[in-house]
């Protein structure tokens, strides 16, 4: 075969091999690459106390309570299957509210409460003007995060 | 106008975003055009030099 | 494709395209800025920070597009040895690096008010940072290796190896739990962005594309000139030293 053809096959074979190798490496490292656990992960698999990790989910409706004059906030984070209680002292992001997605970093204490050192808001991929959001809610078509 | 500049309270995040994008993109454009101009003039000088240097090839001596 | 591989032809063609590309970039950018900053509504949830999208998303799209372009040009250079493929890849790199930088910085500026943090090491952000380093590494290879042929080969291999990162970036938000949300535009169910916000985004995306073409053409033209200069300087040195390489014995005999 011509040298050109040979170079082409070499490049193609190289790319395929690279792709396969990368896929295998990523699959092997799955557990280590986890950015956050869902509440179900925490409840079903269990996490050792004092191990730092992140938990992500939605702020459960009617679960937010503030104490210490609003400095400490307690709420439950849920993935609609399981929920984990969270307690946090500090500044909450602007987007924090019930029904909102969050990712909290901290540790699980002995009583199964997640003591968070940081709470981040995780928003979805939908973008629309306020009027459209209101109209969808009025029509009962709202599928996004609560406002 | 001040409402526009305030960006709903997020001015400190919105305006720097646009500013940085503008600076970087304009900067790259300017640098690229300058390199082009320099290369063009250097090439022209070399080509003129070549035309003027029409001496016979006497590398042997 | 072979017709355009001729540098002289390329110079003529690019000279004709350039003013149009530049003009388009300017007009589209102005239109996009006015539309996005002035007329687009705030987001129901993110308020006016959504306007950062009109710079952040086009930059991110172009960061990935530029790398793909660079990888394809590199493969072409490696396989078919087109002279222009080489120049194209080299020219695209700094443009892609700039777009990636803009995406990262504007992303941080958007993340801090909305997420509550400037940075997280989730799969999306990390893979885009890797992209930035790949661009820098690619540019460094060209600078570091003296011989253009060798530099071209090394850089091309890096570009191709690094290409694995591009699908990782795209699908990172689907394959792993990330803080960064899933795709809003290029998804199976169609865009999740309301037209009043989507349209200015698309205009800016086109503006950035036109900008890419403009700067790319300028840079390739420079590359062609620089190679000519290098060739002429080497030819001149060869002339002054003595054109044909004489056998070793003659050189020592001559002095």
Image (cartoon, coloured by chain):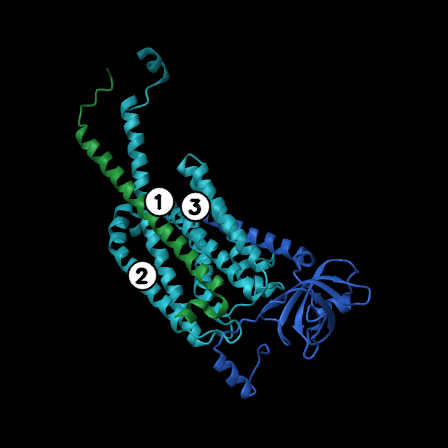
Quick one: which chain is green? B
C143 sits to left or right of C30? right
| Residue C186 at least partly seen | no
Circle 3 marks a residue in which chain?
Answer: C
Q: Eyeballing the image, is C62 above or below C139?
A: below
Q: Which comes sooner in the sequence, label 3 or label 1?
A: 3
Same subunit: marks 1 and 2: yes
Q: Residues within 10 Å of mark 3 (few under 14, many from 20)?
A: many
Circle 1 marks a residue in which chain?
Answer: C
In the image, A71 versus C19, the foreground residue is: A71
- Percent of width and height locating residue C49: 49, 67
Q: Which comes sooner in the sequence, label 1 or label 2?
A: 2
| Foreground disc of the pair 2, 3 | 2
Image quadrant where residue C198 sits? bottom left
Q: Eyeballing the image, is A41 above or below B37?
A: below
CB contact under 8 Å: marks 1 and 2: no
- Percent of width and height locating residue B1: 39, 70
Instruction: Identify residue for label 2.
Output: C26
Instruction: Identify residue for label 1.
Output: C83
Instruction: Identify residue for label 3.
Output: C78
Q: Eyeballing the image, is B9 above or below B25?
A: below
- Please tell me the colour of chain C: cyan
In the image, B26 versus C13, the foreground residue is: B26
In the image, C44 versus C70, the foreground residue is: C44
User: At x 20% / y 34%, what residue is drawn?
Assistant: B48
How far is the residue under mark 1 from the one under mark 2?
30 Å
- Percent of width and height locating residue C15: 25, 52
User: At x 53% / y 49%, what residue is drawn?
Assistant: A14
In the image, A72 versus C36, the foreground residue is: A72
Q: Residues within 10 Å of mark 2 (few under 14, many from 20)?
A: some
């Amino acid at each position: 075969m011509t040298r050109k053809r040979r170079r082409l096959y070499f490049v193609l074979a190289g790319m395929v091999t690279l792709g396969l190798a990368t896929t295998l490496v990523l699959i092997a490292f799955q557990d280590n690459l986890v950015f956050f656990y869902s509440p179900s992960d925490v409840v079903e698999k269990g996490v050792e106390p004092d191990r730092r990790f992140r938990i992500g989910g939605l702020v459960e409706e009617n679960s937010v309570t503030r104490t210490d004059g609003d400095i400490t906030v307690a709420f439950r984070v849920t993935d609609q299957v399981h929920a984990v209680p969270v307690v946090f002292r500090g500044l909450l992001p602007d987007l924090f509210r019930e029904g909102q997605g969050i990712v909290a970093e901290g540790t699980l204490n002995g009583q199964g409460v997640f003591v968070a050192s940081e709470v981040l808001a995780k928003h979805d991929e939908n973008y629309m003007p306020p009027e459209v959001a209101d109209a969808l809610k009025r029509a009962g078509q709202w599928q996004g995060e609560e406002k | 106008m001040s409402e526009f500049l305030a960006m709903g309270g997020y001015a400190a995040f919105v305006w720097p975003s646009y500013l940085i994008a503008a600076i970087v993109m304009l900067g790259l454009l300017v640098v690229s055009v300058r390199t082009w101009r320099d290369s063009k003039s250097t090439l022209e000088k070399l080509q003129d030099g070549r035309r003027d240097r029409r001496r016979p090839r006497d590398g042997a001596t | 494709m072979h017709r355009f591989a001729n540098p002289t032809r390329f110079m003529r063609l690019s000279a004709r395209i350039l003013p149009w590309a530049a003009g388009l970039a300017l007009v589209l950018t102005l239109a996009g800025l006015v539309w996005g900053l002035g007329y687009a509504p705030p987001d129901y949830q993110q308020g006016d920070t959504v306007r950062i999208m009109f710079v952040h998303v086009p930059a991110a799209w172009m960061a990935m597009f530029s790398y793909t372009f660079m990888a394809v040009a590199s493969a072409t250079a490696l396989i078919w040895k087109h002279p222009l493929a080489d120049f194209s890849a080299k020219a695209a790199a700094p443009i892609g690096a700039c777009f990636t930088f803009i995406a990262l910085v504007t992303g941080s500026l958007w993340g801090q008010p909305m997420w509550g943090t400037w940075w997280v090491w989730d799969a999306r952000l990390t893979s885009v940072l890797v992209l930035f380093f790949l661009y820098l590494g690619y540019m460094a290879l060209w600078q570091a290796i003296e011989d253009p042929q060798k530099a071209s080969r090394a850089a091309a291999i890096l570009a191709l190896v690094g290409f694995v990162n591009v699908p990782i970036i795209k699908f990172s938000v689907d394959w792993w739990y990330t803080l960064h949300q899933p795709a809003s535009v290029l998804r199976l169910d169609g865009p999740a962005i309301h037209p009043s916000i989507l349209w200015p985004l698309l205009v800016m995306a086109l503006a950035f594309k036109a900008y890419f073409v403009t700067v790319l053409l300028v840079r390739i033209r420079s590359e062609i000139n620089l190679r000519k200069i290098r060739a002429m300087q080497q030819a001149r040195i060869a002339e002054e030293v003595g054109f044909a390489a004489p056998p070793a014995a003659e050189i020592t005999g001559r002095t």
